[in-house]
Amino acid sequence: MVRQIKITMPDEKEVLSPAGIKAGEALAARQDRVASFPVAAKVNGAPVDLSHSLDGDAAVEPIDAASAEGLSILRHSISHVMAQAVQETFAGVQVAIGPAIEDGFYYDFEYAEGFTPQDLERIESRMREIAAADCLFERREVSREEAVELFRSKGERYKVELLNDLPADVKTVSLYTQNGYIDLCRGPHCPSTGMLRAFKLLHVAGAYWRGDERNRMLQRIYGTGFATQEALDEHLRLLEEAKKRDHRRLGRELDLFQLNDEAGPGLVIFHPKGTLLRTIIEDWERKEHLKRGYGMVIGPQILKADLWKRSGHFDHYLENMYFTEVDEQSYGIKPMNCLAHMLIYKAKIRSYRDLPLRYFELGTVHRHEKAGVLHGLMRVRQFTQDDAHILCTPSQLNGEIRAIADFVGYAMGIFGFEYEVELSTRPENSIGSDQDWELATTALEGALRDSGMTYETNEGDGAFYGPKIDFKLKDALKRKWQCATIQCDFTLPERFDLHYIGEDGGRHRPVMLHRVILGAIERFMGVLIEHYAGAFPLWLSPVQAVVLTVTDSHIPYGREVRGRLLDAGIRAEGDFRNEKLGYKIREAQLQKTPFMLVIGDREAASGQVSPRQRDGKNLGSIGVEAFIDLVHEQCKQFK
RNA sequence: GCCGAUGUAGCUCAGCCGGUAGAGCAACUGAUUCGUAAUCAGUAGGUCGGCAGUUCAAUCCUGCCCAUCGGCUCCA
């Protein structure tokens, strides 16, 4: 008589089954409750193959292919099939690792020749054959010695290295075999290759073995996969959509900025409209900082090299800095704004009553970023930070950090971004004592806790002078960007011997916070362009309204209207060309201008305008003053 | 910096096997004077990323360099 076990189904109902039943069979017994397309199962919360045998009482639930977990399993299975296809198609390829990632998967290979886009097609068609053959993914557990022997015999030294680096207490590992192809893998996998219906290889790239640039560079193939062809098509459509929002493309189409070979890589040239957009953001920032008790300051672009030696930049930031010589003196072009701010603090004796002191600078910095990392406005070599340094007593630290976090929240709300928070701790190459790092890290953590924020911790990811809180904003396409950051620093006040006279009449060391809200204005603009797809909200839009004449006879009135708008502080243009109205509207629409003001016989006679909104909505004929009020009203909260 | 790909008119892109280049849009000129996403006609526009090399001849083949794109590493 077979032993019976109790299985708890997803709907909480319990059923009795013979021991040894497979998870997939148990779920199939209750078809009505089973997801349409399970790729794996969870047994007591742990993901397992559908072929996993149940030996004791267990709670079982399906993992649907379309769920986040299911997709990840599906993609991982696809990556195995890709590895097989690659090794069958090309001789002399060794496999490294091939995980599922956020939007797909990759597999790293050692292949001296490298893969071409044509190779991807060959690989993909072989993958389709393997998928069509509907081969089982079979799990087998072996001792790690046995696994090492297996992969050594196949010449797979990356797999051998991975096995050798497993913790000592790991005695057995699992292998998955499909279609005769064996790979080291924790699993789970979907039951068979027939489930891999919708996938596509996207591109090849180099990637360092284990992400370390001292290691050999491998060939990485990226791909993606979905439960259905429709979902894959939708994903590919979104990729196309993202391309249309690319800030580099929109920057050109909307005439905002250029990056020019002749000027140099990573150097942005702002055109009038881009400059206007930037100025609007900067004006908003100045106002918000003044409201919050910051003092505006401006430091020099170059400072003597000796000062950079004192700050530690010379020893820890040299490869990112530019230097120049003036009158036989070496000067460093500033990569950060803190130095001048230190000197401002030192300009007189400070009392505890003066603190906190908050110095704000829209500071332009130069950093020698590696050539391969430059990217539009997002990664440049000269950029302007909305930078501030706050000098305060240790007891003020918590309140200051929380106030900055509030500021960040306010700013993100204004621009409509969600964000995540990360705490980064001491890196390897750093300055300062253990005690200071401990204090600084505790201060950041404490403030995060006190403001009730949820955050993740990145060990070893801090700046060389202190730990930091990073705010990663999420744009309309759910991509994450690092903008705001708060860094806590005990070291620079020490190195510059800053002090204040305390209540006790003695000298004390202040603490410093480095922080940015939008980060680099250039990057923030790039994110904004993509977030809004170039259709900026009215208050940000470089051109808020364009006056469109129907025929030449309306030009005099058109000029008058434009003049009145300019007088009222509205950023207005006129399109008085000899073109048909439809043509001008199309052009204004492509420029994403918020309001198009149509001027024809009716408007000229009545002294009105007919605004058409960017969304196509027509507001009818209204007086010019009424339109001015409308614009002012819509921008009011940002003034 | 590393791996791979790409670079033709302002933009998007053609250009076969080596015989010095073409389209659409934009620009300019003219006609047209028009009511909510493209009026018609004409004109002009190119060191084929740069420098070498091979060749009778190079946009095309080779090498080096520059820049860009996709990644890796790094980062605001």
Image: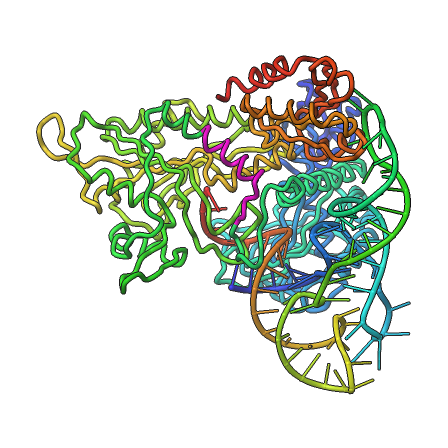
Q: Is residue A453 visible?
A: yes
The prevailing secondary structure element of the residues shown in magenta is helix
Residue at 60%, 65% in the rendered image: A152
Task: Give the camera-side residue of A62 and A246.
Answer: A246
In the image, A129 versus A54, the foreground residue is A129
**Residue A21 visible at all:** no
Residue B45 in picture, x, y percent from top left = 74, 59
- The quarter holding residue A232 reads top right
As for residue A276 lying within the magenta part, the answer is yes
Q: Is residue A64 left or right of residue A365?
A: right
- Left or right: A23 with respect to A412? right
Quadrant location of the N terminus of chain A? top right
Which one is in front, A35 or A126? A126
Find out whether residue A147 is within the magenta segment. no
State left or right for residue A300 relative to residue A179: left
Label count reads 0
Q: Where residue B20 sits in the image (x, y, percent)?
A: 80, 71
Q: Is residue A398 above or below residue B74?
A: above
The residue stretch that appears in magenta = A268-284
**Is residue A303 or residue A564 the one in the foreground?**
A564
Residue situated furthest left in the rendering: A505
Q: Position of residue A487 (x, y in %)?
A: 36, 38
